[in-house]
Amino acid sequence: MKRHVLALSFGLGAMLLATHHAFAQQPGERGYCAPYAVVAERLAGQFGETRQSIGLSGDNQVAELFASTESGTWTIVVSTPAGLSCILAAGQAFENLAEHLPPAGNPA
């Protein structure tokens, strides 16, 4: 389980860096935005997606990866402290990875 969380953490870190620029835009330019409960309910109801990982950015925005291991769909959602949640990206072919770090002192 720790390996799964570690692997997702690296990907989530990259997503958080990308979200800072996205949230500098005006609300109408972000794509689909709604209160968190509405977004989470729609992802669960229409796509069977549940939250797989979560992270907090330096400006207190929450980035989450929702996915369905059955259908393989995935969605990246970023929420502001004010409660507005926006879908930043979505796709197919989601897989859980359990990658290992290289041994210490052994460059990758």
Image (spheres, grey):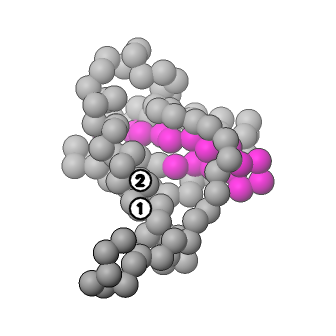
Percent across and percent down for residue 84 are: 41, 32
The residue under label 2 is which amino acid type? Leu
Residue at 40% from the left image edge and 39% from the top image edge: 79
Left or right of 77, for residue 56: left
Residue stretch rendered in magenta on the structure? 65-81
Residue, disc 1: 9
Q: Secondary structure at mark 1?
A: helix
As drawn, the residue found furthest toward the right would be: 70
Q: Residues within 10 Å of mark 1 (few under 14, many from 20)?
A: some
Among the 4 quarters of the image, the one containing residue 97: bottom right
The residue under label 1 is which amino acid type? Ser
Q: Is residue 35 magenta?
A: no
Q: Secondary structure at mark 2?
A: helix
Residue, disc 2: 12
Left or right of 69, for residue 55: left
Q: Is residue 80 above or below residue 54?
A: above
Residue at 41% from the left image edge and 76% from the top image edge: 101
Residue at 34% from the left image edge and 38% from the top image edge: 18
User: How far apart, in angstroms, are the residues tagged by discs 2 and 1?
Assistant: 5 Å
Contact check, label 2 and label 1, Cβ < 8 Å: yes
Residue at 48% from the left image edge and 40% from the top image edge: 77
Percent across and percent down for residue 92 are: 67, 41
Q: Is residue 78 magenta?
A: yes
Residue closest to the eye, 51 or 8: 8
Percent across and percent down for residue 42 are: 65, 35
Q: Residues within 10 Å of mark 2 (few under 14, many from 20)?
A: many
